[in-house]
């Protein structure tokens, strides 16, 4: 086979691969733009704002992302992660004393049983036990709401990460396309600068 023919085949193939990579790059970029825009719009619609810097508690001031985002609107995946883990998570620990909605279920049931038994036996501390039951019930309801919102925000954060990965894949596709195109141009240049009669891959 003539060397020029071989160069032209490889160069044409490189152009085809470059075109494919460009197409893939646009697909990835479109998905990345959709994810970024969708997450932004959905979070912005919730009208959640970070606490202004002047109103942050000492515990909150110790969290870098709460200070960095103080007073701003929650409108990105990264901010959603910060708000979920470092704001809601921080306050839930204070409310539940380290317990979760699930683990408070057993404590709530025990408190209810103790109160019910006290009422049935006419114990003097029935009202006190009722107060303890009401307290843990309120804690559990608050934990449920907080953990639900935290989970939803972290889902938005996870969706935004897929968008970031798609943006990275798109950039790499465009870069790969550029490399292939440059290689193909070099191949065409080499092909037309090679003598027509030069032969490679000769079968003996």
Image (cartoon, grey):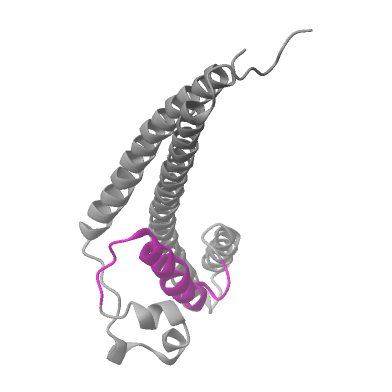
**Image point (53%, 18%), residue name:** 196
> What segment is highlighted magenta in the picture?
72-99
The secondary structure that dominates the magenta segment is helix
Q: Nearer the viewer, residue 110 or 136?
A: 136
Left or right for 105, reference 170: right
199 part of magenta stretch: no
Q: Percent x, y for residue 62? A: 47, 87
Q: Percent x, y for residue 162? A: 44, 46
Quadrant (top left, top right, bottom left, bottom right) of the N terminus = top right
**Image point (49%, 30%), residue name:** 193
Q: Percent x, y for residue 112? A: 53, 62
Quadrant (top left, top right, bottom left, bottom right) of the C terminus = top right
**Image point (60%, 59%), residue name:** 106
**Image point (29%, 80%), residue name:** 51
Which of the 4 quarters of the picture holds residue 54? bottom left
81 part of magenta stretch: yes
């Amino acid at each position: 086979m003539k060397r020029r023919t071989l160069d032209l085949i490889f160069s044409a193939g490189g152009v085809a691969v470059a075109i494919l990579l460009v197409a893939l790059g646009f697909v990835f970029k479109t998905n990345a733009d959709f994810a970024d825009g969708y997450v932004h719009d959905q979070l912005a619609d919730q009208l959640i704002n970070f606490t202004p810097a002047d109103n942050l508690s000492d515990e909150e001031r110790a969290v870098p992302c709460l200070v960095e985002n103080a007073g701003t609107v929650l409108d990105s995946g990264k901010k959603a992660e910060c708000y979920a883990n470092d704001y809601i998570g921080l306050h839930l620990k204070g409310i539940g004393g380290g317990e979760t909605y699930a683990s408070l279920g057993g404590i709530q049931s025990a408190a209810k049983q103790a109160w019910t038994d006290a009422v049935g036996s006419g114990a003097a501390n029935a009202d006190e036990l009722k107060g303890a039951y009401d307290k843990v019930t309120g804690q559990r309801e608050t934990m449920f709401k907080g953990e639900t919102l935290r989970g939803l925000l972290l889902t938005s954060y996870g969706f935004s990460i897929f968008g970031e990965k798609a943006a990275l894949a798109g950039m790499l596709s465009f870069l790969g396309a550029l490399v292939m195109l440059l290689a193909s141009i070099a191949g065409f240049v080499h092909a037309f600068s090679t003598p027509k009669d030069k032969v490679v891959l000769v079968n003996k």
